Image (cartoon, rainbow, N blue to C red):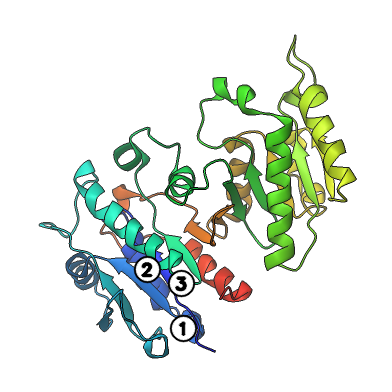
Amino acid sequence: MKIKPIIIVSGEPYGVFLEIFFKTLNNKKIKTYKTPILIIASYDLLLKQMQKLKYSFKIKLIDDKFFNLNKLNNKNINLINVNFNCNKTFDKISSKSNHYIVQCFNLGLKLMKEHKGCALINGPISKKHFLKKKFPGITEYLASKTGHTGKEVMLIYNNNLSVSPLTTHLPLKNIFKKITIKRIIKQVITINKFYKKFLNKIPKIAITGLNPHCESIKDKNEEKKIINPAIKLLSKKKIKIFGPFAADTLFIEKNVKKFDVIIGMYHDQVLTPIKTLYEFKAINITLGLPFIRISPDHGPNNQMLGQNKSDPTSLQEALKFVNKIRVN
């Protein structure tokens, strides 16, 4: 059977992604993966950064319209070139890169729509310069680009424990307005389906409260009015859902071992503990799209650009995950 490649969109050109990509290709285990890797990036920029950082790979230029699956392997860099005017090998992040990033994403999405890739991995971008407040994050950007706005779910995945924020990149003052029974039900069902389909597992899902200790504060009682009714409805669907739990003790070791997924009400409520527990051994998966989309769980990290000190673990975990589930 011909194995479709993992499509990688390189993201912000002046982030550390190409560096961690080179480090990942240097990993002996990656070279043994049967699923080929195909990156969309600027040939000129990739070559300049590779030489500056003192890596050495053969680059195989691939035509996005005609590529032979049998000839793709991970001994070389399989590259689809997107032109980028890179006067400098390393530079500050600015909106000047936006056209290039859009072209890379458009090409990656086109290949996924044509069923030429098994999964899409993207390098991090700058929300400030690229999204410009049009979207809270890349999760919502890709949902819009694929016509799946409102279906997207962020899952920060680790083999031991995953987390999913009900709301993503929102100011705290706006969070309670977005917490609804309908939203909780959609998120839990999406996660449950994902685990069953790709991991052959019915997950045990815990859900946090919103208020400290899950207690009412004046007229605020989301636990009683929203979260508990949602849990009851989901339990009737034979989904293993538990809670609501106070977030301040949910992540202690004996509790973590009881669950596969913890859903929180807002971003930092669950992302802070998961990153504390697993650092770069977690990956960001977008559920609810027509394909599997993953990104390393870190930003472009421009301040470390060119230093060759960035940790490639999250990208390696992303590739490991795709090879584990073997989407084709």
User: How far apart are the two marked residues, 2 and 3, measured between alpha carbons?
Assistant: 18 Å
Q: Amino acid at mark 1?
A: Lys
Q: Quadrant of residue 234?
A: top right
Q: Earlier in the sequence, mark 3 or mark 1?
A: 1
Residue shown at the point (72%, 57%) measured from the top left = 193
Residue 40 position within the rendered picture, expressed as x and y whole percent measured from the top left? 31, 67
> In this rendering, does residue 214 appear at all?
no
> Can the viewer see residue 36?
yes
Residue for badge 3: 117
Q: Residues within 10 Å of mark 3 (few under 14, many from 20)?
A: many
| Residue 122 picture location, percent across and down | 41, 59
Mark nearest the camera among 1 and 2 is 2
SS category of the residue bearing label 3:
loop
Q: Position of residue 224 (x, y in %)?
A: 83, 23
Looking at the image, which is closer to me, 77 or 231?
231
Q: Which of the 4 image quarters holds residue 323?
A: bottom right
Name the residue tied to disc 2.
Answer: 21
Quarter of the rendering containing residue 196: bottom right
Residue type marked 3: Gly
Q: Which residue is mark 1?
A: 28
How much space separates mark 3 and mark 1, taking CA atoms?
23 Å
Left or right for 11, reference 245: left
Q: Position of residue 288 (x, y in %)?
A: 59, 52
* Residue situated in front as seen by the camera: 261 or 4: 4
**Disc 1 versus disc 2: distance between alpha carbons?**
13 Å
In the rendered image of this protein, does residue 108 appear above or below residue 97?
below
Residue type highlighted by circle 2: Phe
Q: Label 1, secondary structure: give it.
A: helix
